[in-house]
Image: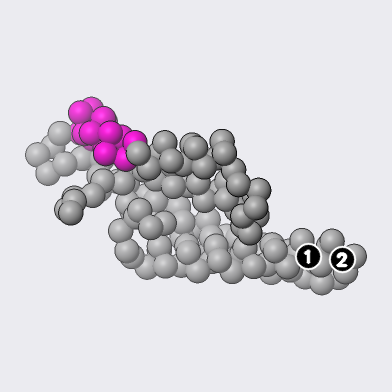
C-alpha cells in the first residue's frame, strides 16, 4: 500500500490486513499445538474483518487507479502513458519477480504473506504514477 496515495481507505486496508494477519498466525499456532477451540476462535475473528479488508483495499486500489486512467488533456492512460508508467516502475516489478523466484526461507515472514505482499506491489505498480518525482 506504500505505492498508493494516502487516504482513509489505505489506512483501514493496512490496519485490517495487519489485524487479519495476527489472527491467521494465532490460528496456525493454536492449530499446530492441538488447541482446536482457540484456533477456531481466531479464524472466526479473521472472518469477521475479512469483509472490511476486501472493501477498504479494493476501494484504495480503485481510488488510486481510476484518476490515473485519463489525463487532464483527455489522452487516455492505456497508450503511451501506460508504457511510460511501466518503464518508470519496471525496476520495482523486476525486484518483485526476483524476490519471488529467490525467496529467502530464513525470513521470519510467512511464505503466503510474502507472496501476497509482492503480488500486490507488482499489480499496483501498473497503476501507480508519481506525479512529482524527486
Asked if residue 96 lies left or right of residue 104, the reply is left
Camera-nearest residue between 54 and 125: 125
Q: Do the residues labelled 1 and 2 touch (CB within 8 Å)?
A: yes
Residue at image x 30%, y 58%? 5
| Magenta-drawn segment | 76-90
Residue extending farthest to the left is 73
Q: In which quarter of the image is the C terminus?
A: bottom left
Secondary structure beneath label 2: loop
Q: How far apart are marks 1 and 2 (CA)?
A: 6 Å
Q: Is residue 113 above or below residue 97?
A: below
Residue 113, x across and y down, in percent: 60, 53
Q: Which labelled disc corresponds to residue 33?
A: 2
Asked if residue 112 lies left or right of residue 57, the reply is right
Secondary structure beneath label 1: helix
Residue 111, x across and y down, in percent: 64, 49
Q: Main secondary structure of the magenta part?
A: helix
**Is 48 covered by the magenta stretch?**
no
Q: In this view, does 114 lie above or below 20?
A: above
Q: Name the residue under label 1.
A: 29
Question: Counting other residues with Cα less than 10 Å from the Cα at mark 2, is it few (<14), some (14-19), or many (20 or more)?
Answer: few
Residue at image x 60%, y 47%? 104
Q: Is residue 120 above or below residue 88?
A: below
Residue 117, x across and y down, in percent: 52, 51
Residue at image x 15%, y 34%? 75
**Is 82 covered by the magenta stretch?**
yes
Amino acid at each position: 500500500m506504500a505505492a498508493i496515495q494516502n487516504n482513509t481507505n489505505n489506512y483501514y486496508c493496512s490496519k485490517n490486513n495487519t489485524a487479519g494477519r495476527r489472527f491467521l498466525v494465532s490460528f496456525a499456532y493454536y492449530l499446530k499445538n492441538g488447541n482446536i477451540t482457540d484456533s477456531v476462535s481466531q479464524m472466526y475473528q479473521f472472518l469477521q474483518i475479512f469483509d472490511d479488508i476486501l472493501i477498504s483495499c479494493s476501494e484504495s486500489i480503485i481510488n488510486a487507479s481510476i484518476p490515473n486512467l485519463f489525463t487532464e488533456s483527455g489522452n487516455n492512460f492505456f497508450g503511451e502513458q501506460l508504457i511510460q508508467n511501466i518503464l518508470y516502475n519496471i525496476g520495482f516489478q523486476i525486484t518483485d519477480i526476483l524476490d519471488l523466484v529467490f525467496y529467502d526461507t530464513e525470513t521470519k515472514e510467512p511464505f503466503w504473506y510474502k507472496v501476497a505482499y509482492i503480488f500486490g506491489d507488482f499489480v499496483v505498480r501498473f497503476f501507480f504514477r508519481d506525479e512529482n518525482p524527486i
